[in-house]
């Protein structure tokens, strides 16, 4: 029997075109997934570089941020100095916050600057009380004008939803709506780091985000590897027929 006859006698692969089409779609999806992870890795690397640069820069006055020509986004993570008074009648507790494995709250207090701005200040973490109805121990704020220094954060990163709020009497914790819907505040808030008085320095200040590049590049290579597996598998199926 000739080679041509052997070739003609080999059974044809069923649904060959359809299988190849599906393989191409899967390869395309894997390549898209790899590109998506790569772009995420690049974006995260650029964000981390910006954060690392800005947290090492000297503190600037609040007036530099709030001028009409200023864009708060260009100052996020910068250290900012501001003078004014805290308004303890507007104070909320962000729930479900953990520090060193302990459950607690993040304390947000409204700050009224001497230049007229009002914004939220994250005063750091406090441990929860023994029961859900027990008021946590919060360091009392000084009365009168003070100076604070903290990291500027965009208001869009302020958690939304239902919070706990300390009532004006200070004796109970009540439910309160999103802080951003209650007052006409600036488009940023401040992570308090220190102040003109010792009690203004938080025992557990707000932490920086993780500044590693993460596993995105490894995931990108993984998706490319999957694309290669699909192509190789399609070739094997074709050859075994």
Image (cartoon, grey):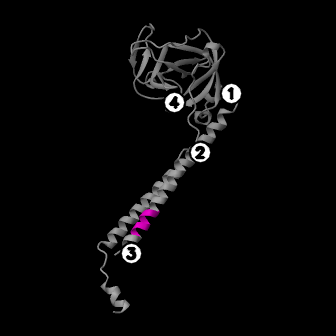
The residue tagged 1 is: 59
The residue tagged 4 is: 155
Front position among marks 1 and 2: 2
Query: Predominant secondary structure in magenta?
Result: helix
Residue 44's quadrant in the figure? top right
Residue density around tag 4, few if under 14, some if 14–19, many if 20 or more, within 10 Å: some
Q: Which residues are magenta?
A: 228-234
Sequence-first disc among 1 and 2: 2
Query: CA separation, marks 1 and 2?
Result: 24 Å
The residue tagged 2 is: 45
Mark 4 and mark 3 in contact? Answer it, CB < 8 Å: no
Say which residue appears at 36% left-offset and 92% top-offset: 2
- Location of the C terminus (image quadrant): bottom left
Say which residue appears at 58% left-offset and 32% top-offset: 208
Say which residue appears at 57% left-offset and 23% top-offset: 205
Label 4 element class = helix
Q: Which mark is residue 239?
A: 3
The outermost residue toward the right is 58
Image location of residue 57, percent across then percent down: 69, 32
Query: CA separation, marks 4 and 3?
Result: 59 Å
Image location of residue 127, percent across then percent down: 49, 18
Front position among marks 3 and 2: 3
Query: CA separation, marks 1 and 4?
Result: 19 Å
């Amino acid at each position: 029997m000739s080679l041509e006859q052997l070739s003609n006698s080999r059974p044809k692969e069923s649904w060959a075109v359809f299988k190849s089409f599906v393989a191409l779609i899967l390869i395309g999806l894997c390549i898209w997934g790899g590109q998506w992870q790569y772009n995420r890795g690049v974006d995260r690397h650029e964000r981390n570089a910006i954060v690392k640069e800005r947290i090492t820069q000297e503190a600037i006055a609040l007036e530099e941020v709030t001028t009409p020509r200023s864009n708060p986004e260009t100052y996020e993570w910068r250290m900012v100095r501001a003078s004014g008074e805290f308004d303890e009648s507007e104070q909320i507790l962000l729930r479900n916050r953990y520090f060193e494995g302990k459950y607690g709250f993040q304390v947000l207090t409204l700050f009224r600057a001497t230049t007229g701005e009002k914004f939220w200040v994250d005063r750091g973490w406090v441990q929860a009380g023994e029961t859900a109805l027990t008021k946590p121990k919060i360091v009392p704020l000084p009365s009168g004008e003070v100076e604070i220094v903290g990291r500027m954060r965009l208001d869009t990163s302020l958690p939304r939803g239902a919070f706990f709020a300390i009532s004006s009497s200070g004796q109970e914790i009540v439910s309160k709506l999103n802080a951003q819907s209650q007052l006409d505040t600036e488009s940023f808030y401040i992570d308090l780091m220190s102040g003109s008085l010792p009690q203004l320095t938080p025992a557990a200040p707000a932490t920086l985000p993780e500044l590693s590049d993460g596993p995105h590049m490894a995931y990108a290579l993984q998706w490319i590897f999957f694309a290669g597996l699909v192509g190789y598998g399609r070739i094997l199926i074709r050859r075994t027929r």
